[in-house]
Image (cartoon, helix red, strand yellow):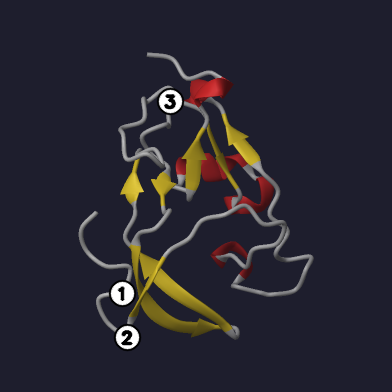
Amino acid sequence: MQGSCQPLSDEQVWSLYAPRSNIPQALTDWSRSPSATNAPLLVCPASLGLGKQFANCFSFACDLAGSINGQRVATCHCALGESIEGTSVRKHSAFVTQAGQGDSAICEEHPVAGSLPLFGASP
């Protein structure tokens, strides 16, 4: 292993994506109230052909971007269509996200997600 776990500067952090029941999101103007932060799992099916469009944000560099409604935010630089193992994801791969509060339209908007080959990925 090379490199360091330290951010490059005091203005950066590393991203971490982990499932949680409540997550403040831009969709609700970063509100922290429980009703506005509900984050159900949403499966975006392989049939949409969007496997190369989700953002893998597990352990990527982020720049601190201030606060919105009291919630600290960062701009992250994440790979599109990449698995957590760092391999390319097939176009027709299912993925799961907690973005969009369950609205399937979010599947087309590069949500932070993880691939789910067991949900219908095909070559």
Find the distance from the CA under tag 3 to the CA under tag 2: 39 Å
Of residues 30 and 117, the one drawn nearer to the viewer in this rendering: 117
Residue 34: quarter of image:
bottom right
Question: Residue extending furthest top?
Answer: 123
- The crowding category of the residue bearing disc 3, from other C-alpha atoms within 10 Å (few below 14, some 14 to 19, many at least 20), is some
Q: CA distance from mark 3 to mark 1?
A: 35 Å
Q: Position of residue 83 (x, y in %)?
A: 39, 38
**Which of the pair 50/86 is nearer the observer?**
86
Side of 7 where 42 appears, left or right: right
Which residue corresponds to the image point at 33% horizontal and 68% vertical from the top-left? 5
Left/right of residue 25 with respect to residue 74 in the rendered view: right
Query: Where 67 sits versus 56, above or below?
Result: below
Q: Secondary structure at mark 3?
A: loop
109 relative to 13, above or below: above
Q: Are marks 1 and 2 in contact (CB under 8 Å)?
A: yes
Quadrant occupied by the C terminus: top left
Q: Position of residue 14 (x, y in %)?
A: 39, 67
**Dividing the picture into quarters, in which one does residue 32 lie?**
bottom right
Comes first in the chain, label 3 or label 1? 1
Of badges 3 and 2, nearer the viewer stands 2
- The kind of residue tagged 2 is Asp
| Mark in the foreground, 3 or 1 | 1
Residue visible at 79% across and 65% down in the picture: 35
Q: Residues within 10 Å of mark 2 (few under 14, many from 20)?
A: few
Q: Which residue is mark 3?
A: 49
Residue count near mark 1 (Cα–Cα under 10 Å), binned few <14, some 14–19, many ≥20: few
Mark 3 belongs to which amino acid?
Gly
Q: How far is the residue under mark 1 from the one under mark 2?
A: 7 Å
Residues at marks 3 and 2 touching, judged by CB atoms closer than 8 Å: no
Q: Residue at x 20, y 58 (%)?
A: 2
The residue wearing badge 1 is 7
Look at the picture and state if 69 lies above or below 95: below
